[in-house]
Image: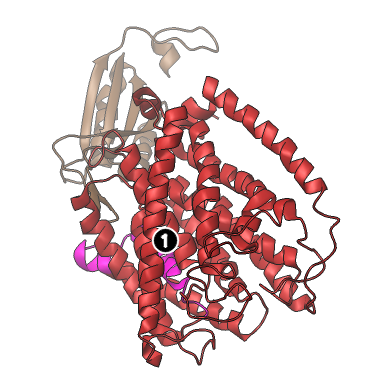
Chain colours: A red, B brown
Amino acid sequence: MGNGAKTAKLFLCAMVLVAAAASCGWADPPAGAGAISSGDTAWVLVSAALVMMMTAPALALFYGGLVRRKNVLSVLMQCMVVLCLVSVQWVVMGYSLSFGPDHGGVIGDFSWFGLRGVSASSSNSYASTVPHQAFMVFQMMFAVITPALIIGAFAERMRFGPFCIFILLWTTIVYDPVAHWVWGKGGILSCLDAGGNSVKGALDFAGGTVVHVNAGAAALACAIFLGKRKGFVDKLSPPHNLPFAVIGAGLLWFGWFGFNAGSALGANGLATSAFVATHIAAAVGGLSWGAMDWIFNRRPTVLGMITGVVAGLVAITPAAGFVSLTGALAVGIGSGVIPWVFVSIVKVKMGYDDALDAFGVHGIGGMWGAVATGIFALVSVNSGGSGLLDGNGSQVLWQLKAVGLTAAYSFGMTFGLLKLVDLVATLRASEHEEAVGLDLTQHREAAYTLVD
Amino acid sequence: MKYIIAVIQPDRLDEVLDRLSEKEIHLVTVMPVMGRGRQKGIAEVYRSHKEAGSLLRKVKLEIAVNDEFVEATIQAILVGGRTGNIGDGKIFVLPMEECIRIRTGETGGTAIG
């Protein structure tokens, strides 16, 4: 219990610092000078709220339904804590590190520490028609859901205190730089140079690489580092509440409209085409995963269907604003087949325990989506990106470079961070804690009572 | 006095309760249980991975009866619970030493009815 108390004290100290930082941030004069569009602003703010909902309750229910009943609260709690913790990290320094002035293409800096100079009334060139803070808060929700996705890999066996420390470190040391590489002005993979001009770079409309490949690779590192749950592979109980998982998947789908169509950063045609592509890829992903189940396992499963929906959404994320309907259909079919083969066959042979298939669905699905974006991107959809179908084969190489660099950095750094945190506080729940369940041992609560 | 325990298929419960009511046997405790006999389970499949279905969903009934109702109870469960397939379940008849009604403190046969 000593570690838990220590972590709590750290939290309180951090909160005081945040209050101090915030109080000196708001009064600064506006920086940019674009014309604010009320329509665009409304859409970006609503999208931010939709993406917030994806972490809790959508992902929380999706993951919570798939674990055993003795661990459901621990997963809901982890999602909630990531939401709270990363939101604070983002306004203190995360946003500045990700989107602030470039340093060597690798990372931003502390220029916007505590949102200093990030105006609520005028825009920044990242999104010239919405207030800078609207862009900031929209991006915040992406920084929140990315570490939350990793939970699926180490579900049911990580202690809570070390979990909090790990998440905070991971967001700062892995997410923030990777977001800068791909989306920050001057980032090494970015389509914008430090001056904001278009240059050759990786296409990632809404975070296929930054969010999904990144979280997926970290998930693999977590699954390997923490080891298998007792009883893996054939002595574990099945998902304790699939209806929860279905509600979660449905809410993820709904929230994903904010994630992808919101990434147009305006209420316009591009948002509309991203919206349609997102929806179709999700639908086709669900259908094709369901078909794979039906053909090879003789029954179409509910879990398979919703997994396919999520895989479709993951894969269309980088592509949403670059591909036509044909591209969306292709991405959807691939996302029902490629992660299916990986989760059903390859994973078992590799033998690691990625409890809820965070790597299989987000890592593999994200990689497929990133590559597919390089193939199917059309200038006729978005002047900012052309792919193999447009005769621009080099875009596929850019996509592979982004995937490779992100996956390697994320996997390596995650492994290092886990080792580091493990030196200070043991990450893995004890055999007893795992057997009793994390709900009772980490939180002294139970999700379900026996009587009344 | 006998204590009768029956493990039956969940989907036969309503039928068994109806047959018991017809014979004026109302006292019954019902609970959902997991169990297994010779019947093989239906393996559940999650993301292509089979979860061993070694235990099956069943319903357990517990009924305390006076001796003259024992045969009628058994018959009601047999008629209501039988499908003829493997997995229809079992009936266990146990001797019962005492029965006390909590509300009145009555004991023995009068407490059962």
| Residue at image point 77% right, 42% down | A19
Q: Main secondary structure of the magenta part?
A: helix
Chain identity of mark 1: A
Q: Which is more toward the observer, A169 or A83?
A: A169
For label 1, the residue is A406
| Magenta span contains residue A294 | yes
| Magenta span contains residue A40 | no
| Residue at image point 60% right, 68% down | A258
Q: Which is more toward the observer, A425 or B26?
A: A425
Q: Residues within 10 Å of mark 1 (few under 14, many from 20)?
A: many
Question: Which contiguous range is marked in magenta?
Answer: A292-321
Q: Where residue B65 sits in the image (x, y, percent)?
A: 34, 20
Q: Where residue A329 sits in the image (x, y, percent)?
A: 39, 81
Q: Quadrant of residue B9?
A: top left
Task: Note whether residue A446 is visible.
Answer: no
At label 1, the amino acid type is Thr
Callout 1 secondary element? helix
**Image quadrant for the C terminus of chain A?**
top right
Q: Which is more toward the observer, A363 or B62?
A: A363
Q: Where residue A447 sits in the image (x, y, percent)?
A: 51, 35
Instruction: Answer with left or right where residue A268 lies relative to residue A106.
Output: right
| Residue at image point 64% right, 27% down | A9
Task: Note whether residue A174 is visible.
Answer: yes
Location of residue A452 with respect to A239 vertically, above or below:
above
